[in-house]
Image: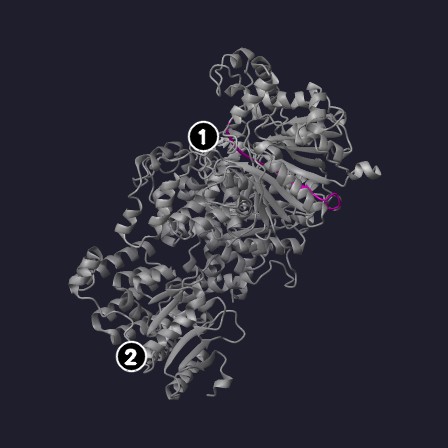
Amino acid sequence: MSHYRKHRHHHSRALTDGSPPPRVAVVAGLRTPFIKSGGDFKDLSAVDLGAILVNELVARSGLPLGEFDALIFGQVVPSQLSSLIAREVVLRTELPRSVPAHTTSRACATSLQAATEAADQILLGHADTVVAGGAESLSDAPIFASHKLAQALVNASRARSVPEKLKAFSGLSLKDAAPVPPALKEPTTGLTMGESAQKMAWENGITREAQDRYAVDSQRKAADAWASGKFAEEVMAVDVPPRFAKIAAADNNVRADTTYAALASLRPVFDKRYGTITAGNSSPLTDGAAAVILMSEGRARELGVKPLGFLRAYAYAATDPGDQLLQGPAYAAPIALDRAGLTLGDMDIVEMHEAFAAQVLSNLQAFASRKFAEEKLGRPEPLGEIDPSRLNPNGGSIPLGHPFGATGARMITQALRELARRRGRHALLTVCAAGGLGAAVVLDGPEA
Amino acid sequence: MNASTWKNFRIETQDGIATVWVDVAGEPVNTISRESGTEFQAVLDLLEKDAAVKAIVLASGKKDGFVAGAKIEMLRDVESADEAERLSLDAQAGFDRLEKFAKPVVAAIHGACLGGGLEWAMACHYRVVSNDRKTQLGLPEVQLGVIPGAGGTQRMPRLVGIATALDLILAGKTVKPKKALAIGLVDESVPPAMLLEVARARARSLADGERLRPAPAGMVDRLKKDPQATLQKLALEENFLGREVLFRQARKQLLAKTRGHYPAPVAALEAIQAGIEKGIEAGLQAEARLFGELAISPVARELMGIFFATTALKKDNGTSDPSVKGRKVESVGILGGGLMGSGIAYVTTNAGIPVRIREKDDAAVARAFASVAGIYDGRVKKRSMDRLEKLARMRLLTAGTGWEGMERVDVLVEAVFEDLKLKQEMLRTFETLNPKGIFATNTSSIPVGDIASASAHPETVLGMHYFSPVNKMPLLEVIVTPRTADEVTATAVALGKKQGKTVIVVGDGPGFYTSRVLAPYMNEAVMLLLEGASVEDIDAALVGFGFPVGPMTLLDEVGIDVGAKVAKVMHGAFGERMSVPEVMGKVIESGRLGRKNGKGFYTYGDPKQKKVVDVTVYDALPGGRRRKKIDREEIVERCVLQMANEAVLTLGEKVLRSARDGDVGAVFGLGFPPFRGGPFRWIDAEGSGRVLERMRRLEGRFGLRFRPAPLLVEQAASGRPFQG
């Protein structure tokens, strides 16, 4: 029995008095196109991308600028030059400078974290209208100096004379001068994301074919969604400053012509001999930004704003990173559903972040596994199976891309718009994140 | 004179330093008047006698301005050259006393320090400025047709050198703190919060006998420090021959630039030269004499007339009821991000107001962003704005292809293609989305009432006619229909002022005011062309009259097709007297649209080469390439009379609210020569009787199109001027 079996009693109001939990309206959502790093956004920082996005979101919302009470924003890989992205975003938009802001982080679940914090603030009565989102620029990722070089630079900056400045560098060797790229590595396990996912694929028996088939399917759904104009309202075109000569109007990792054969021919990345994870069945490194505007139901009604839907419940959970790093959704989802007073069967849509096809398939396996439910969750029944037609109906992070800080907000908007199209009532969102974290959010459609 | 009765000064003495606050009672800015001049002498008397006062700081009691210059009314009211000269001599004497004052005087300058204000500061012993963007210094007198009359032409060259002084005085340029410090106009530039403290400390040091300015460097040191500038100064300023060259060059450039229309810069040059060559006493005498002559000159009168007209317009809310307040404008929408739309977006974001542009597709959106950014980049390049400020302004701009966001704008400016149906469709869509918003059409020729007829509430519809390029052209013509609400008019007028425009409000009708008075002027030029005049002669004649460009060049600039389209509208509205010569159709059909397609009355090939008339244009015209010599005076007379008579018609029809608005509109919107004051002041100066007589003579020759306006006949009969 693992210590994860310790019982948690998550009594939501829904369970105690039968009424639905208080909820918060999502009145608008928007994202930039997601562009593979090194592409059209390569000269933009996360702050730039966030500001472009939020400025357009705010302008499109048609809400008076005085309505905005706060902005919560995040990025996962820090920028070198701005330490507080949220405030920098406010200062780079037409939002009044009096709008307070804070940066938040929960790795790949960062913009879900921003949204649920915003919802908390609204339910507490601290705010009526909050912008929540995130941005990522891996084109602008920080390259660190080695520890020795960094110390030498600091010492040199304190030195008063040229000889003293030079002396600061005297103990360095050539290898100390080499820049150190940021690691997407779990510091405590020493494994990268990809290596952890590969481990999950092996342990859960997820085959290469299953992964590639999943990826092809997700690519096709994303391409169909673009082709049918479903994304037109939720993705802005970015005219790339400062020249405005380039226009990024669509995600550039979505490929309508992806075939199973093409994916099957790719070489595995993380283990050349036995590996099954390839560039084709993983999410790419991506630049982009996404955000939503959350509002108290009362204020939305007063202003006559028609919500896209509602944030009904959420939960965060965690597992041992050394176990199965990206299995977090399987831990968080049951709690969020309990808090919502709903079951997986009530969900018209499940949006599951696709870090890797192997991870999605592992999460789905855990959702359906009685053994997992009993041993890991201490629940008698598994959560259940998900009808494939309800899972990521317009594609997920593998085709669309995954700017870490932006994915959660993308999923909220994408799910709510699809719920509206389907006249559905509820959606479940899950995100796996570094450190063994899992996030789950339950949304209500506009009619629910 | 008792200090307690002063209306312009307050003195505050502490620790031996007297701070003299210039604070003209009841006025938002400090100006110099006879009264303040007299009071200042009393201030000096008092400070002279007060043994407790060791040194003096001269500062402004106004929050954001030092002294803006002499009170223009004082100049306007002088009746003779002698009187004006005496005014100048008195001011010179006053500042002379200040300069020779036994106790040190330090000027603490924040905000505008212009004209007499700068002459005042230059007479002080030391100048400290705030390094604030509101601070600017200059001698802009020539812009009003006069020259600095209180020693400015003498002290400025001695402070900054002859070449720099000529550059600043002859063009009436102003400089910012950084430049002022670099050229030596001021001694120190400090943060605004430190201004008084530093000024007082310097005053104390001067009183203690400290030398604050380094002794003039020797030639060797100067050469070491800045060889190029030193050599240039040596060659041009510090020897007789060089100075001759310098002055001759400056005079030549001036005459080329002003074409002899503006005597003030030439006079300023003369005063400066007199002072340099014959000494400061002779210089001051020349300055006072020339000042006196200029003050009553027709050019100065007209320029001051425009100054007062624009000042009056600044206080005008655009309606007949001065108590009407406009709505607060917190955001502006713009339909169309082309040349006009992006220009309007620039002036609006530059005023700190968020703008939302709607364009037809992503590429057009990107072009709109690029075009607004381009205007800002130009300013950054010219250093009239810093990069961070540009970015801050650009953030106020968003754009998209949908109507999203237009539901919250307070004013929507429509700048789409000139097509009634399209504009009406835009209006209807906007109203369903934003029932309270003001719809302002930037049409230049379609009657606003026709557009407003599609509205469910026409009281919120008006015209805002900007001129191209919007970032440079100073005029905004606001067009109201009989149904436009006053509050809506006042909102548009206030918005225009925030955008930095001079705003006139005119009635609805084909061409409103500016396009309408321009049409017969342009038509007449085309008539002359058909009679055989050459393109060069027509343009040269009207440039000679004082227009910045001639009508043929103008037609090339706006587009020959656009001109023809407007002309057609006018013809339709006003009938035969505005009939368009048919041959213009042929010119356009031959693919000649003007500068935009590189084919017009002139050639537009190599931008480095001087443009010349494209003689092939004559092949489509009667007379062919052999042109007839038509007297320039006749060209001017016919074209200008057409414009002036049409202006009188619009006043008679109450399209114009006043002759003042007509003059301002023509000068700022059409380039009517400022020194002629505008069409109404021009008629006044020529005499309405004489103008009427010339109209009748031309009517005899050419018929209907020269029929005098009824109001002109009336004015001529009564002998009353249009502008009193």
State whether the magenta stretch is mostly helix, strand or loop.
strand
The secondary element bearing badge 1 is classed as loop
Mark 1 closeness class: few <14, some 14–19, many ≥20 residues within 10 Å: some
Disc 2 marks a residue whose amino acid type is Gly
Please identify the quarter of the rendering in which residue B527 is found: top left
Q: Subunit of mark 2?
A: B
Q: Is residue B429 visible?
A: yes
Q: Residue at x 50, y 57 (%)?
A: B664
Identify the residue under disc 1.
Answer: A38
Give the side of residue B231 with respect to residue B262, left or right. Answer: left
Give the side of residue A175 with respect to residue A253, left or right. Answer: left
Q: Viewer-proximal residue, A384 or A399?
A: A384
Q: List x then y, in percent, for residue A178.
A: 35, 35
The secondary element bearing badge 2 is classed as loop
State the quadrant of the C terminus of chain A: top right
Vertical position of residue A138 compared to residue B450: above or below: above
Q: Tell me the tag on residue A91.
A: none
Residue that lies at the very extreme toward the right in this rendered image: A17
Identify the residue under disc 2.
Answer: B209
Q: Viewer-proximal residue, A328 or B100?
A: A328
Q: List x then y, in percent, for residue B199.
A: 39, 72
Q: Per the image, is A290 magenta?
A: yes
Q: Viewer-proximal residue, B445 or A125?
A: A125
Residue that lies at the very extreme toward the front in this rendered image: A1
- For marks 1 and 2, give the one nearer the viewer: 1
